[in-house]
């Protein structure tokens, strides 16, 4: 790897430090320390720049606390001023190492993340029979300072940048005690070598990628182990040869010993992919991805705690909704529609925050995917008549159907008086025969009357384009993604008569009648009286 120099002037530039301060502020605007720093922003940045250039900068102490969920960990929080330096450093040296990192390393990298790691894990699970899931034992508390400094020196040759990295590493506070012996160690060697970097620093996450980058290249280039991915200290290798994967595990364990790391025996397993493998809080199988039991228990505890805080007024409803909106976005990566719907109804203020797609949106079992005709897709244009796009979308299929039809009528520019809405289960997607299967799916909506019963709107399946074949209109008017046009007076009636038996008519509601007083008819469209 070619070493890079001449980075110091860019690191201590006013522009780089100012950008670092703004990035550090994200999520911390209400912290007193952040407010004090930004109250005198220019002076603070200039003072920090001067101390870095003079070589007098020294990291401050850490504020430490323990968390127990999902497991006991010591978290070390640096001061705001030190966090600015961390961001400024990573902004400069990250591009140097990014060129070397493998593609399937997903932690703390732009354009990566745990959701993409999950997607890749499931994709490989569908292609291979076995997965070797490995976990490094107490990774951050076990990182050896001397080995980490050598890894950084392999990519950097700017002496002042390396000196700043060394000061940050040496300024680490004591971590959890991890006493591990390796070949060649004496009895007191683990006590003589400094190890452990703080969990919570941006630099620690980046240094972790640098530390294990040699392992990534060893697995892919020396072992040629096949599909491989890593998220921080969680590793996964896929293959169809069980014996070969056992050899890969032994080779990885031997290589990690050179980094003074060991595998977690309890979490490192070789299993068939169909058994379900825990990865990043989910249980992954080739056909499903579900939250693991520990994540669900954590959700229940949060629900009980925040419900109690809402009752006493210790937390606002908006904060609860924001919290569960973030959780819903994460949980939506897997097959969790039922759980998200339960949270939506049980938690006050979360009706529109968790799992924004309607119940007939994302997952419908054997029925496949049913589009959000009267749901979220239609909500984007619901504002046109002052409607709330979340009302009736996603739970009550009748109200969702009604609102979706109203929007279809408005967008199509057709008059509403004397119209009917028709729902036909026989138009269900993917061979569904009953409305109860596949969720509350909108099977079909047909606009009747006023135009000789022809050329009506049929919103069905992954529906949503409306086409009007009457009155000389050529191009269909798009509402969603799929167009379907049905002629009610087709010459070949259904032989079984199921069509006439299964259809249910809904009269246009008072809300539809109200909007019909000001129909939205495009100027270029012919009026009802001018239609043949």
Image (cartoon, helix red, strand yellow):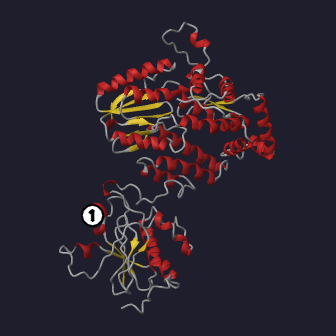
Q: What residue lies at 71% left-to-right and 43% top-to-bottom?
A: 21
Instruction: Residue 130 in the image: state x and y as whole percent.
Output: 32, 33
Quarter of the image with the C terminus in it:
bottom left
Question: Does 505 sit above or below residue 332?
Answer: below
- Total number of numbered discs in the rendering: 1
Q: What residue lies at 66% left-to-right and 38% top-to-bottom?
A: 87
Q: What residue lies at 46% left-to-right and 71% top-to-bottom?
A: 403
Question: Does 453 sit above or below residue 357?
Answer: below
- Secondary structure category for the residue under label 1: loop
Residue at the far top: name it: 186
Task: State the image quarter where residue 7 is shown.
Answer: top right
Q: Is residue 201 left or right of residue 378?
A: right
Instruction: Residue 152 in the image: state x and y as whole percent.
Output: 59, 27
Is residue 79 shown to the viewer in this render?
yes
Instruction: Residue 36 in the image: state x and y as whole percent.
Output: 79, 43
Density class for disc 1 (Cα within 10 Å; few <14, some 14-19, many ≥20) is: some
Is residue 509 shown to the viewer in this render?
no
Residue indicated by mark 1: 433
Please state which of residues 227 and 329 is positioned toward the viewer in this rendering.
227
Task: State the image quarter where residue 133 is shown.
Answer: top left
Instruction: Residue 454 in the image: state x and y as whole percent.
Output: 33, 83
Residue at the far left: name it: 495
Task: State the image quarter where residue 167 is shown.
Answer: top right
Please state which of residues 254 and 37 is positioned toward the viewer in this rendering.
254
């Amino acid at each position: 790897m070619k070493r890079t120099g001449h980075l110091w002037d860019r690191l201590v530039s006013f522009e780089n430090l100012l950008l670092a301060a703004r990035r550090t502020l994200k999520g911390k605007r209400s912290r007193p320390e952040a407010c004090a720093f930004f109250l005198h922003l220019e002076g603070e940045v200039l003072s920090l720049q001067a101390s870095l250039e003079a070589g007098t900068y020294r990291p401050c102490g850490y504020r430490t606390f323990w968390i127990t969920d999902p497991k006991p960990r010591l978290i070390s929080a640096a001061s705001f001023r030190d966090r600015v330096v961390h961001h400024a450093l990573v902004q400069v040296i990250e591009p140097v190492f990014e060129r070397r990192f493998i593609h399937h390393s997903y932690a703390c990298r732009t354009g990566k993340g745990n959701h993409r790691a999950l997607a890749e894990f499931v994709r490989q699970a569908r292609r291979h029979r076995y997965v070797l899931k490995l976990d490094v034992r107490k990774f951050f508390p076990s990182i050896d300072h001397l080995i980490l400094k050598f890894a950084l020196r392999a990519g950097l040759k700017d002496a002042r940048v390396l000196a700043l990295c060394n000061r940050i590493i040496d300024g680490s506070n004591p971590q959890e005690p991890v006493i591990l012996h390796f070949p060649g160690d004496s009895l007191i060697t683990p006590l003589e070598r400094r190890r452990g970097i703080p969990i919570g620093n941006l630099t620690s996450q980046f240094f972790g990628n640098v530390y294990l980058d040699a392992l990534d290249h060893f697995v892919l280039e020396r072992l040629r182990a096949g599909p491989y991915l890593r998220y921080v200290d969680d590793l996964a290798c896929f293959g169809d040869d069980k014996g070969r994967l056992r050899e890969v595990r032994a080779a990885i364990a031997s290589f990690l010993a050179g980094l003074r790391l060991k595998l977690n025996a309890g979490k490192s397993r070789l299993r068939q992919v169909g058994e379900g493998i825990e990865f990043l809080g989910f249980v992954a199988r080739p056909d499903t991805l579900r939250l693991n039991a520990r994540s669900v228990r954590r959700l229940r505890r949060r629900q009980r705690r925040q419900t109690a805080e809402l009752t006493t007024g210790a937390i606002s409803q908006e904060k609860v909704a924001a919290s569960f909106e973030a959780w819903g976005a994460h949980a939506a990566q897997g097959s969790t529609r039922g759980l998200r719907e339960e949270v939506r109804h049980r938690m006050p203020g979360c009706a529109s925050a968790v799992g924004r797609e309607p119940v007939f949106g994302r997952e419908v079992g054997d029925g496949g995917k049913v589009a959000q005709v009267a749901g979220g897709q239609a909500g984007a244009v619901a504002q046109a008549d002052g409607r709330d796009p979340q009302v009736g979308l996603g739970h009550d299929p009748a109200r969702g159907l009604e609102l979706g039809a109203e929007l279809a009528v408005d967008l199509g520019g057709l008059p509403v008086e004397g119209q009917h809405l028709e729902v036909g289960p026989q138009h269900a997607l993917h061979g569904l025969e009953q409305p109860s299967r596949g969720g509350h799916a909108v099977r079909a909506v047909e606009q009747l009357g006023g135009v000789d019963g022809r050329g009506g709107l049929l919103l069905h399946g992954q529906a949503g384009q409306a086409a009007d074949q009457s009155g000389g209109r050529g191009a269909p008017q798009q509402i969603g993604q799929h167009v379907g046009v049905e002629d009610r007076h087709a010459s070949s009636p259904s032989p079984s008569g199921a069509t006439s038996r299964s259809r249910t008519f809904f009269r246009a509601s008072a809300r539809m009648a109200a909007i019909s007083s000001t129909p939205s008819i495009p100027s270029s469209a012919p009026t009802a009286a001018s239609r043949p």
